[in-house]
Amino acid sequence: MKILAFIRPAKENEALILSELAEKSEGHWGYDEKYMVKFKEKYRLTEEYIKNFPVFVLEDKEKILGFFGLLFEKDEVNLEFFYIDTDYIGKGYGRMLWSHLADYCKEKGIKSFTFVTSPEAKGFYIKMGAEYLGEVESSVKKGRIIPRLIYYVK
């Protein structure tokens, strides 16, 4: 299958669409309703976030297939969002979006970024070149331990 999608900056009025995509993507792993309610609260993308931080969407034929968003805090860069629509997981779109993320960081002089992920998605990020830093407690579910990774921009 040939990928015809392209990547562009997110528009502020897409905050709800992107939040719903993140929720659908996270729900792909079969988490319970209580977890998903908290996830939705914590990872709700806002127009303000899109206005203040880099957020890029992967689009094909006017359908958003995925997106990423970086967060700058103090001297640290965090990958706050990286989601692919569940209908498009495993079809090369994640790799395409990751390549754009790495290119963007290189262009902006960002040397590395850190992020947390679900245990199920850890393998994807390792394949993309991220390195395992250890584990931390999830901010969504108390007692849930999740991987923390770093990516050194090449």
Image: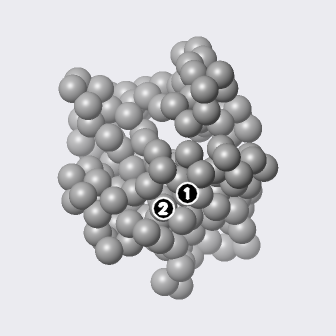
Q: Residues within 10 Å of mark 2 (few under 14, many from 20)?
A: some
The residue depicted at 56 percent of the width and 36 percent of the height is 140
Residue 9 seen anywhere in this rendered image of the structure: no
> Quarter of the image holding residue 153?
top left
Q: Nearer the viewer, residue 111 or 50?
A: 50
Q: Nearer the viewer, residue 100 or 40?
A: 40
Q: Report if the CB atoms under discs 1 and 2 are less than 8 Å apart.
A: yes
Name the residue tied to disc 1.
Answer: 22
The residue depicted at 33 percent of the width and 59 percent of the height is 46
Name the residue tied to disc 2.
Answer: 19
The residue depicted at 47 percent of the width and 71 percent of the height is 17
Q: Position of residue 105 (x, y in %)?
A: 33, 41
Q: Position of residue 67 (x, y in %)?
A: 47, 59
State the SS at label 2: helix
The residue depicted at 65 percent of the width and 36 percent of the height is 118
Q: Residues within 10 Å of mark 1 (few under 14, many from 20)?
A: many
Residue 40 seen anywhere in this rendered image of the structure: yes
At label 1, which amino acid type do we have? Answer: Ala
Q: Position of residue 57 (x, y in %)?
A: 43, 64
At label 2, which amino acid type do we have? Answer: Ser
Q: Is residue 19 above or below residue 5?
A: above
Q: Is residue 9 above or below residue 80?
A: below
